[in-house]
Image (cartoon, rainbow, N blue to C red):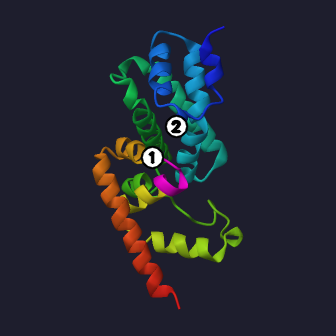
Amino acid sequence: MNSVYGFSSMNIDQNSDLLPNLVAKAKLGQEQAFGSIYNLYFEKIYRFIYYRVSHKEIAEDLAEDVFLKAFSKLSSVQDNDSFEGWLYQIARNKVIDYYRDKKQLVDLEEVENTLIYENNIIDVLELKENQKIFLELLKELGADQQMVIKMKFLENLENGQIARVMKKKEGAIRVIQYRAVAKLKELIKKISP
């Protein structure tokens, strides 16, 4: 039995060498390795898509499409360490394609950079008052700031992962995050008694 089977329940963040090794094995045709990648990332990719399309079944279908495309294009990954960013890029492109195919009048840049928090995505009635205020204040930030805050604190991505998805340097992500948090603090002070 290949040792790859034991990786499926591990957290990818616990072992930075795990993903590149799995990618290398998957490139060699070891389907079990790609299965482990799928198990490690499906939930993250699903959430990433769900927050952008606000529909469970569509998000599931698109997430599956992401992994099908990743599997078919695996040989095009030059640097195994960049696989995660590449996977999120595929997910981002699938969301854009989804809206293009639907021919809805949606600003594609807004879809890329924001999570739409409306009644059909999060039942506002179930949110605590502080959460509602936070979501409203978040709208006051620029698109990059919103995306960084959402990926960092709602999707629990690390700065390096966010940098790969946004195609920016990790230092730039830290600056965007710092400015976004400072702006949120300033906005909170304005509404606090």
Examine the rendered structure and indicate whether residue 179 appears above or below residue 24. Answer: below
Can you name the residue that lies furthest to the bottom here?
193
Asked whether, in this view, residue 147 is left or right of residue 53, the answer is left
Could you say which is closer to the camera, residue 174 or residue 90? 174
Q: Which residue is label 2 attached to?
A: 13
| Contact between labelled residues 2 and 1, with CB atoms less than 8 Å apart | yes
Q: Position of residue 152 (x, y in %)?
A: 47, 54
Q: What residue appears at the point 34 percent right and 24 percent down from the top-left corner?
A: 79
Q: Which residue is label 1 attached to?
A: 158
Task: Determine if residue 43 is in view.
Answer: yes
Asked whether, in this view, residue 174 is left or right of residue 149, the answer is left
Image quarter of residue 7: top right
Q: What residue appears at the point 51 percent right and 87 percent down from the top-left corner?
A: 192
Image quarter of residue 76: top left
Examine the rendered structure and indicate whether residue 14 appears above or below residue 191. Answer: above
Examine the rendered structure and indicate whether residue 57 appears above or below residue 131. Answer: above
Residue at mark 1 to residue at mark 2: CA–CA distance: 9 Å
For mark 1, does the 10 Å Cα neighbourhood hold few (<14), some (14 to 19), or many (20 or more) residues?
some
For mark 2, does the 10 Å Cα neighbourhood hold few (<14), some (14 to 19), or many (20 or more) residues?
few
Q: Position of residue 106 (x, y in %)?
A: 44, 57
The amino acid pointed to by label 2 is: Asp
- Residue stretch rendered in magenta on the structure: 151-157
- Is 17 contained in the magenta span? no
